[in-house]
Every structure is written in structure tokens, then in C-alpha cells.
Amino acid sequence: MPTPNHTPVPDYAAMLQVALAEARIGLSEGGIPIGAALFNRQGELISSGHNRRVQQNDPSIHGETDAFRRAGRQTSYRDLIMVTTLAPCWYCSGLVRQFGFRTVVVGESENFSGGIDWLRSIGVEIIDLASPDCITLLADYIRENPHIWNEDIGEPAP
Ligand SMILES: [Zn+2]
């Protein structure tokens, strides 16, 4: 609904659903279920993507980097919102820092907290929705695929 007399609060939960749908696509492809999406402050979708490590044999394609690449060139990221089903890893936290995103919405940080404390420390707004859907989706995957998960986060095999 338009709210012309004051700044509308972005519907973060609705944004997360876009990232979560990407995560589920990734799972259906046999990949790691992590998705992400970029929105502008008006809540318009810029791009979305998901982790494709398994599908494309490419360790650099995380949910966040996939959404980032699919957004194409942007003159500024200050007013874009990064939405991801899981707290961004160090690699993706570096991306957030490098390009100046100021707001990151994370579906959860329970399975993995990545770099969110560091992002907060440099002034990035972190909105953690603690979504049970996100937590369960990834927890189930990690339990069934511990080696792939550890590979993705750069940890030794369990
Ligand atoms: Zn990452």
C-alpha cells in the first residue's frame, strides 16, 4: 500500500521469500540451498540468485555473489538491500563492505554466523529474521551433506 506521508518500512519478510525461493531452486538442482536477492529501498527486486558450487563446479558462486552478478553494473549499492537466507560468509561479507551496502537482511545466523558481527562493527545494518524455514532447510542439508557444507565454508572435512 502506498504511504505517501511517511517513509514505508521495507517488507523484509516478503523480500526473504524471494531469496528462500532461490534456495529451494538450488536444492532442487542438487545444490546447497542458499539464496539471495537484491532490492532497492522502494522494495523493487533488482536481481536474485543462489549458490551454484555443485551445479557449476564453481566455488565462487555463493547466493550473494550470484545475485550480485545478476544485478549487472550498478552505480551505487548504498541504497540497495542485500537479502540472503543465511548470514554472509567472510567472502560475501567482504563484498558487502567493498561495494558499500548499508543494509543486509539475513534469514538466519544459527547454522552459520559468517561475518555479521564484523559487518555490524563497521556500521552495516544487519536485520536477522531468524526464519525457521531458512534454519530448517539448511540444517537438513548440512546433516545430509556434511562434506559439501564444509567445503563451501572452507572448513576441513568432518
Ligand atoms: Zn558467501
Image (cartoon, helix red, strand yellow):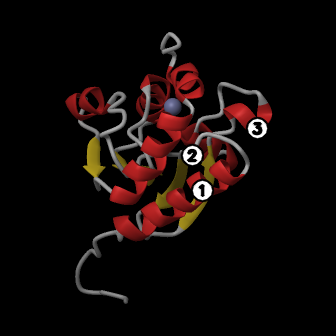
- Kindly identify the residue that appears in the image at 27 percent across and 51 percent down: 127
How many numbered circles does the render carry? 3
Q: Amino acid at mark 1?
A: Arg
Instruction: Say whether marks 2 and 3 touch (CB < 8 Å).
Output: no
Which numbered disc, 2 or 3, marks the residue that appears first in the sequence? 2
Q: Amino acid at mark 2?
A: Pro
Q: Is residue 120 visible?
A: yes
Which numbered disc, 1 or 3, marks the residue that appears first in the sequence? 1
Mark 2 → mark 3, Cα distance in angstroms: 12 Å
Quadrant in the picture for the N terminus: bottom left
Closer to us: 20 or 136? 136
- Kindly identify the residue that appears in the image at 57 percent across and 32 percent down: 145
> Is the shortest distance between ligand 1 and the CB of mark 2 under 8 Å?
no
Q: Would you name the residue on which mark 3 appears?
A: 55
- Kindly identify the residue that appears in the image at 41 percent across and 30 percent down: 97
How would you rate the neighbour count of disc 2 (Cα within 10 Å): few for under 14, some for 14-19, many for 20 or more? many
Q: Name the outermost residue toward the right.
A: 56
Tag 1's secondary structure?
A: helix
Q: Name the outermost residue toward the front.
A: 144
Q: Position of residue 76 (x, y in %)?
A: 50, 46
Instruction: Say whether marks 1 and 2 touch (CB < 8 Å).
Output: yes
Q: Would you name the residue on which mark 1 appears?
A: 24
Tag 3's secondary structure?
A: helix
How would you rate the neighbour count of disc 1 (Cα within 10 Å): few for under 14, some for 14-19, many for 20 or more? many
Q: Would you name the residue on which mark 2 appears?
A: 33
Is 6 situated left or right of 113 in this image?
A: left
